[in-house]
Amino acid sequence: MSPQKRVKNVKAQNRISQGSNSFQTTLSAWKVKQGPSNSKNISKHGQNNPVGDYEHADDQAEDALQMAVEYFEKGPVKTSQNKDKTLEKHLKTVENVAWKNGLASEEIDVLLNIALSGKFGNAVNTRILKCMIPATVISQDSVVKAVSWLCVDKCSGSTKVLFYRWLVAMFDFIDRKEQINLLYGFFFASLQDDALCPYVCHLLYLLTKKENVKPFRVRKLLDLQAKMGMQPHLQALLSLYKFFAPALISVSLPVRKKIYFKNSENLWKMALLAVKQRNQGPSPEPLKLMLGPANVRPLKRKWNSLSIIPVLNSSSYTKECRKKEMSLSDCLNRSGSFPLEQLKSFPQLLQNIHCLELPSQMGSVLNNSLLLHYINCVRDEPVLLRFYYWLSQTLQEECIWYKVNNYEHGKEFTNFLDTIIRAECFLQEGFYSCEAFLYKSLPLWDGLCCRSQFLQLVSWIPFSSFSEVKPLLFDHLAQLFFTSTIYFKCSVLQSLKELLQNWLLWLSMDIHMKPVTNSPLETTLGGSMNSVSKLIHYVGWLSTTAMRLESNSTFLLHFILDFYEKVCDIYINYNLPLVVLFPPGIFYSALLSLDTSILNQLCFIMHRYRKNLTAAKKNELVQKTKSEFNFSSKTYQEFNHYLTSMVGCLWTSKPFGKGIYIDPEILEKTGVTEYKNSLNVIHHPSFLSYAVSFLLQESPEERTVNVSSIQGKKWSWYLDYLFSQGLQGLKLFIRSSVHHSSVPRAEGINYNNQY
Amino acid sequence: MDSYDVPESTPSASSRPEDYFVGATPLQKRLESIRKQTSFIPTPPRRKVPQCSQLQEDVDPQKVAFLLHKQWTLYSLTPLYKFSYSNLKEYSRLLNAFIVAEKQKGLAVEVGEDFNIKVIFSTLLGMKGTQRDPEAFLVQILSKSQLPSENREGKVLWTGWFCCIFGDSLLETVSEDFTCLPLFLANGAESNTAIIGTWFQKTFDCYFSPLTINAFNLSWMAAMWTACKVDHYVATTEFLWSVPCSPQSLDISYAIHPEDAKALWDSIHKTPGEVTQEEVDLFMDCLYSHFHRHFKIHLSATRLVRVSTSVASAHTDGKIKDSVS
């Protein structure tokens, strides 16, 4: 906008605000400031609206907007006394919503009609037009309807000008353009109007297709040029025509470096950025960085792109232009293959999958879930390689802890990692680039920066030989693990649990799809199982040490047992021949825990171990032949040992005999006389409170409770009480592992008729 | 980004293509080699000095002369996808149009012959280490001040070249659709490098990133350049160390007569045609102890940021300059 015009605008604005409240003046103050610095503009907008949108809750604002739109739709009420005030209020509402969130296409449809129908005065029309900012898109029909109003000549010249400027500015947000293009002749005729001519030229420049270029139009343009002189906007349109149809225009057009069109979207610059952001999803770039040359990023690496991930562009442009017989204009009007920019839905993808153009930069698929589907099933190795090269290099370059004192892009990097992780979850598959990145960067990681993202990347490491990965990754991770807080330890265990799950899923599919001989990294199933079991042992080692370091923290133990909930069910859930028990350090910590939920979880895990081992044993018996995956007797013995300890403690009140063995002499020295039943379901520290509540429930008047009275029938009522308190793990454990006979005893799994 | 529907994670309900997971694809093999590379020590403890590379055989002396005495900014580059040496002319035209378009951003683009710049792609024959290395190529941007009919070319505005020298380990993992030229050197305005880099990234789906030279490699360069025989020395051998401290970092410059440096190196260096890590370390240690004797400053505790010799100079931020062929 030229300076003179801006002044005029401000005046117009002042005129509207005459005689109105102070709120109005602040608005005009804001308008004055709208100008060279757009960054100020936005903040002023927010601050100078004392009764502005920020005080309203969102739904309130919505209602207000609804009322405002209805008001405008009905038209001004002639009789109303405070007509101006109501009008002002509603206008304000629309403006606030428009600048903050944009308007829905239906609202724009209604308001655009009103602005051009001349129901209200010129000043109101201007204000409405200025805030026609879409939330996402503008419907083509609204534009066509609006143009039809131009024909009936209800609005003033300045409104028309503003409408064309708006149309040019919002051109990219109109959902379709076919019908608008049908109005080409109408727009072209408007070139006659001297005031409209520059803006109509710009619109035509955006709208013109090859088939719109006709000899009579060329003649008309040349006539206009003869009449009005060398106008830059006319020249621009002419040069476009000449490009499409060089034969029709013989006059030579000077090469001009001058700007052809005045920057007519100036009014909406901030709004446009906001709409673009809304449409593209959150940009990793803070808004202020996009505001003009003064703020261009100092980093050389940024070059042209605003975000790390390249914008989606189909590559056909360069590919087809390489064929020399095709001219550039043919390229632009090409048909046949399906351009990525139009790919919006899954059915579209399915229909066009054979003729889809690949993006020119493969990295752009990260932001497009449809294309992620595509690369998930494409067999073309170059596609994967292009993505791999790009991602590896980008991770390497963006990684913030490689750079000294350069944490300002931390947010950007975090967002980037989040995007990658989302894509990995979506594909249920890790990227090799990320794995390579982890190998390189983990030794340098401080354990703080992007922690959650980094650990999630760990859980997506593709299945591989554990011994190969250990020195590259897990040794470094262990160092950080032991030296960091309990929360870090828990997060690591959590992500290792997810890693285990991902590996198990991968393997369970791998095995059942094909013979395992050509699995990539481990040649045999045995090798794969070995790798998984090493991972589990590694976590067992981490956990045992961590329990000591954190003095048997219940919180930590929960995370550890969560891991073993996955481990104990491998045989049944994933159909993989592997059962690994937990280390004693974990088992006994859980058994002697003061927390009922831990004990309950332990019972559940023991129950599942039992199910898995029995299932495995059954299969062995069915198959008869010794396969290489028969579990060693050691696993069964170990399990039986745990089971005996548990039943001895909780049920038979015979601890420390079998299972945990403690020399009776030592026990005597402790001075505890009644140690035998002190760990059963009644006296165990984590159950004692249940026993007391149970007794109190039975006889609330009782002053003294004697928990030892829970015997015989009461014992089974007590158990029912425990089960009703949500201790499902305990229930399953007792139902499966304890014989209900007069003499309770543990029921171990027979192995070779021992026990 | 669109919202994802995370597929259910039960293994039985799978709709995946059957052979998706299995089979060792070249990509997976490539990863294996990455795992091995990562576990390797990054730099071999000894390097052979090639006596006669391809370079000396079929190189165009004019072009090489053109590359000397210029300061180059280094970038590393991922393999170029679908790059073809037979299309260099076409690339010149496209890049030309792209540059013009970029420079006139916001203006209507005039498509035609009216550019005042000219882009030339050409190969740099012989600029490679082994026969397997792909041919290097040069991109120049000239201003077209003279008439095009005249053979005299205009002023060179910007130069960049892509090369691969002894890229054996990289070439192993690159398939035929890609051209592996991992090193890109640019001389000229940063804004031009940005435009041209962007074009390459869009056209060949590659990725440029600034290449820095760490102190470790700088000391290798210092040692190897010192070893070069030069008829007459034009410059002193100079090292620059940086001491990080606020508000301004402190730089320590250390200049030695090139002949002294050469004498020191000769006394250290043993096997001709081969340089070992120990020799390089010893060379630097000698310099350190000499400096310490005079100034009581332990240079080993600071960071080497620049090395310049009569042969060439290099800065840690990835700028190098060759002085003598």
Image: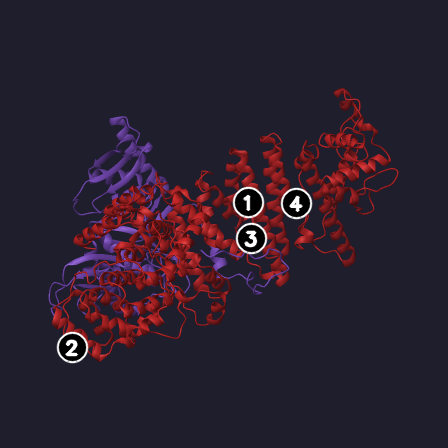
Q: Position of residue A320 (x, y in %)?
A: 33, 72
Badge 4: residue crowd in 10 Å (few <14, some 14–19, many ≥20): some
Of the chain colours in the picture, the one used for chain B is purple
Residue marked by disc 2: A250
Front-most of A189 and A208?
Answer: A189
Write the residue at 72% across / 56% down. Answer: A627
SS type, badge 2 = loop
**In the rendered structure, which disc, 2 or 3, sits on the residue that comes first in sequence?**
2
Residue marked by disc 4: A565
Q: Position of residue A630 (x, y in %)?
A: 72, 52
Q: CA distance from mark 4 to mark 2?
A: 81 Å
Which residue appears farthest toward the right when viewing the image? A742
The count of marks equals 4
Left or right of B103 in this view: A642:
right
Q: CA distance from mark 1 to mark 4?
A: 14 Å
Badge 3: residue crowd in 10 Å (few <14, some 14–19, many ≥20): many
Left or right of A466 in this view: A187:
left
